[in-house]
Image (spheres, helix red, strand yellow):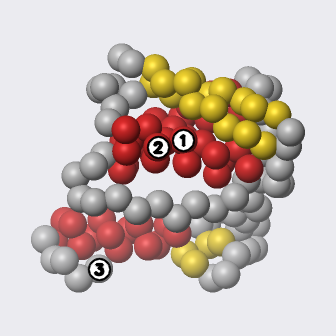
Amino acid sequence: MPTYGLKVKGRGEEVTYSVDFPYDAYDCQVTMMERVVEALHAGENALLESPTGTGKTLCLLCAALGWREKAHAGGSRSTRAPPAQIRDVDGRGDGRIEGGIDGRRAMERVGEGIMEGSGDV
């Protein structure tokens, strides 16, 4: 499995993230992985665009895993605080989260739609 060393500049330092990719990556895939790692390293959002069939999902997953491996090893820290954790509204652990979204019920409805073969969930 090829490994790509993606260099990211930030906070006066240059950090290299090792990203495993299951195939020989095209230039556009390496660029996309660099942008994903760059955004993760900076704790920023990224808006990425690429045509159908260019491996966007695979690039995103591989880059995120490569960043996570180094970030959790203490090799890099994001400049922003981690996102707020999802919390139960009432603390009962029933799947309801802040904002009134019932996560457990939503997943039950998706499952019901699949079992019934209906596309309307």
Residue 78 lies, in percent from the top left, at 78, 45
| Residue drawn at the location 30% of the way across and 46% of the way down | 55
Residue 26 falls in image quadrant? top left
Within 10 Å of disc 1 (Cα), the crowding (few <14, some 14-19, many 20+) is: many
Dot 3 or dot 1, earlier in sequence: 1
| Residue type at the position of mark 3 | Val
Left/right placement of residue 44 relative to residue 56 reads right
Q: Mark 3 points at which residue?
A: 121
Q: Which residue is drawn at 27% across and 70% down?
A: 112
Q: How many marks?
A: 3
Indicate whether 57 appears above or below 115: above
Which residue position holds label 2?
Answer: 31
Camera-nearest residue between 28 and 72: 28
Q: In which quarter of the image is the C terminus?
A: bottom left
Residue 71 is situated, as x and y percent measured from the top left of the image, at 72, 33
Q: Is residue 5 left or right of residue 84?
A: left
Q: Mark 1 points at which residue?
A: 34
- Rendered residue at 39%/28% (across/down): 21
Is there a contact, CB below 8 Å, between mark 2 and mark 1?
Answer: yes
- Nearer-the-camera pick, 67 or 105: 67
In front: mark 2 or mark 3? 2
Q: Hey, which quadrant is residue 51 in on the image? A: bottom left
Residue 58 against residue 1 in the figure, above or below: below
